[in-house]
Amino acid sequence: MGHDAADVLRGTLDLLILKTLTLEPMHGWGISARIEQVSRGALDVNQGSLYPALQRLEQRGWVGSDWQTTENNRRAKYYHLTASGKRAVGAETASWRRYVEAVELILDIA
Amino acid sequence: MSLIGAIRARVRAMLFGRALDRDLGEEIQFHIDLETEKNVRLGMRPDEARRRALAMFGGAARTREDHRDVRPMHWLADAASDARFALRGIRRAPALAGAAIVTLALGIGANVAIFSAVNAVVLQPLPFPAQDRLMVITEENPEKKWHHQVAAPANMLDWRAGVSDFADVMGYVDGAGQATLTGFGDPQPLTSSWVTGNFFSTLGIKAAIGRTFTDAESWRSAVPVVILSDAAWRSRFGADPALVGKTITLGGTPTQVVGVMPSGFSYPAENIDIWLSVEWNPANRASEGFRRAHWLRAVARLKPGVTIDHARAQLGAVVDRLKRDYPATNKFMGAEMLPLHDFLVGDTRLPLLVLLTSVAFLLLIACANVGNLLLVQAATRERESALRLALGAGRARLVRQALVESLVLSAIGGCCGLALGWAGTRTLVRLQPAGLLRVHDFGVEPRVLLYVLGITVASGLLFGLAPALWLRRRDPATVLKDGGRGAGQGLRARRWGEWLVIGEVALAVLMTVGAGLLARSFWQVRRVDPGFDATGVLAVQLSVSRSSNEASVAAFAAQLESRVRALPGVSGAALVSNVPFTGTSYTSDFIAFGRPAGGYGTEVGHRTVSLDYFTLMKVPVIRGRTFTADDRLGAPPVILINQALASSYFAGEDPIGQRIAFDKVPNKETTWYTIVGVVGNERVDALDVAPRIEVFASELQEPLHSPTLLARTSGNVAGLTSGIRAVVRELNPSLALLKVRTMESLRDDSMARIRFLTTLLVAFAAVGVTLAVVGVYGVLAHVARNRTREMGIRIALGAETSQVRWLVVRHGLRLTIVGLLIGGGAALWGTRLMTKLLFNVQPNDPATLTAVALLLATTSIIAAWLPARRASRADPASALRAE
């Protein structure tokens, strides 16, 4: 958890959550820990925006949730990808790639 | 899952908002716990670990809030919490909220009352089926200066026959008459209406019992027929269902009851007891008199699908044909057609519009005042707002909060206003002069409730807008930097408040000028000399049997006069066909012997009087003589003229001894009357209507079948009434006293309309001015408070108390003068619309304008004085220390 870690851009948070959930169902803390870990501490999920994002995704029907018991025997809300969520990951990823390419193109030229 | 899931999530969120909050709370708690554990693993102390976990989260409450914003319908929950917050605010500052609510209740209440009247009179349709197809047809004669004149029966029948767009055309006598019912205990006066046979069928109203008149019953038949109102049937005949078909005696004539109308039907006047058919004589159909005498208000019903313009064109063609066919009567006789509703609303539209404008201004002033209160409050709460902004509250949310607060205030004000307005309508119903509002009863109806809702929300938004917008523009950093003295020193807040006050003063000026002009008119009307002395004169209307012959009518009159004159306390008695303020008997053409026909502008009014009339009423005889006992039946016909006729028609010559006739073109049968005297003018129509030209015939030569007895008394009027009743009963037991009025009350009635309007407008203007002055006071008090330090410094530097005071008063005067200029300018333009309501006063009357300006200037100086005095007492030491 470095202090120079970048905040996750609002629009990209949804994509990161969806991508993380493709591995397995997870609870909120797990998702933020995983993003931090995978990005090697470069990305710092603002936890105040994590839960609203989850709620948003749930409303769009891309993510489902249910209460389960953790290995430490505690109640936690686990999120999982729905069928349409899985389709959305592909589309969102593609659109993100296009975006990144476009930005790099501009950076290279300029 | 996608769509259905989304919908389910939304529904769940809406229904189980609270449960979701709990879920979310648990989830966040879980997250924080795990984060804390992680921090502990990284080597932190437990409390530090937990603090960091919380900080990472950015505040649990904030997350929950953001989270909720994602949820649909969250604004509803927010609005509820805003409303709760607002109510808490009201409890916190009850004086301010109370002032706002009272102000609003006054404004809204006045609007409710006046709008109820407008709704009842102007907006509600007439209570007849397909009422929009009912049209009034009036006769228009530029030569006689007739406008909206009643129709001659022959013309009416010809329109009916000639215009195929009309389903039917009926007629009735405007207003109500009187008839005496005998045979049911004491003779009873009944309020009657004369109508043609197709009156009810054209209106589309059926009888509740029996039938309405048939078309044939317009014409004289063996047994006259009558229809009763529900009220008369119940009160006079004990609701006897077998009455229909029976015969009752009206004015000495046996008349058959053919029907009873449904309850609530009373047209064309209020409280009609009976409807009588007009009973035309079939032999007169072709006579000139049937086309010359105008006495029926004609109403046509258009066939379905017919346009007004088409029917009007057809009517025009018939009217043109009548002009050619009957030149003696119809040469200049045009016709106009307009919807019955428009015709009946007629001249009540303008007074109601003026009243409505006045209460609208009142509400605007009230809104400005409340807006100012809230602005002051917002300014004093500036630090609170700034703090909330700095802590991350959304600016939009704060604005919304402010608007919800004002809406809650206006809602409470609206409810109080509705109650006040309901009481107001009751008062209006009671106070309204007969005939002003046409409907005698009206209340708060759905449309009125809608209107209240509208003005309540509109005013809430209106007065909430200023503080809300102002709030939006504030920069929290500046406010917080200002430190403790932040309270509303913002120049902008003060500017806004000042503009509100200027607007209030301008509106108050408009209202006061309007009210002032009417008050001046009322005063002018009161000062008018009616041409006679009304004090202590009682007027008793009688109806002599229709069947009596001339000689017995004359004998009855003579006995009545002498018997009443002998009653104790009576100083004089006389008979007249129509007392002043009730119009004339009839009007006619006239011509002086030897003059060419057509040399006059209008028709002459006729009245018949007994010998003592002029003495009793103290009407001066200007030239010649009045009637004597020798001017009786069989003697050469003589006539008196009034001064108006003498000075217009006989200008520059001596009318005495000239002969006059009442035909347009005299012929062999024309009766010539010799003018024997000229008497003073009397205002016979109303106090504010100039005397018309009149002639007087002697009651001895033309006996009165329906005279009004005048008696002057120095004593008790009520006692006199019973004395007269006894005399009448003794002379003719079948007579009833139809109407008993004092001339003074008739005179008051003649002013009732302008007095009613004046009273209301003055009352509204008084409230408006008070509110505006309170507004001036409020702003100045605020200014004075915030300039205490400045005043303290000025005083410390040696300024005189009076100079300091003058600073504040000058401020107030500046506001008032700008308001006066704006309001005065608008009044100069706006009051022209009132011209028709004014009497002997110009709409830009300088006296009224000056008086209003002085009134407002004086009151606002007084309003400025209190804060000025407080400011001038600022203690320099403490004022400076306060910083």
Image (spheres, grey):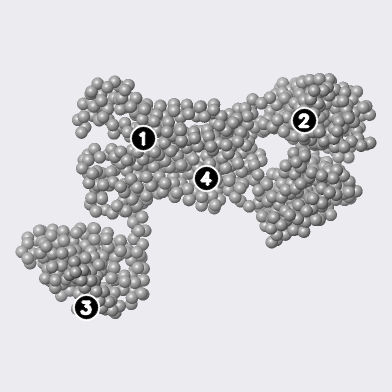
Q: CA distance from mark 3 to mark 4?
A: 65 Å
Q: Tell me what residue is drawn at x 18 percent, y 61 percent.
A: B57
- Output the chain of dot 1: B
Looking at the image, is mark 4 or mark 2 earlier in the sequence?
4
Q: Residue at x 55, y 36 (%)?
A: B831
Could you say which is closer to the camera, residue B801 or residue B73? B801
Discs 1 and 3 carry the same chain letter: no
Tag nearer the camera, 3 or 4: 3
The residue pinned by badge 3 equals A22
Q: Residues within 10 Å of mark 4 (few under 14, many from 20)?
A: many
Q: CA distance from mark 2 to mark 1?
A: 59 Å
Q: Give the labeled residue for mark 2.
A: B693
The amino acid type found where label 1 is placed reads Val
Q: CA distance from mark 1 to mark 3?
A: 65 Å
Amino acid at the residue labelled 2? Ile
Residue behind mark 4: B112
Residues at discs 1 and 3 in contact (Cβ within 8 Å): no
Q: Is residue B664 above or below residue B211?
A: above
Q: How far across and how far down the image is residue B54, in percent?
A: 16, 60
Residue B635, located in which quarter of the rendered image? top right
In the picture, residue B883 is in which quadrant? top left
Q: Chain of mark 3?
A: A
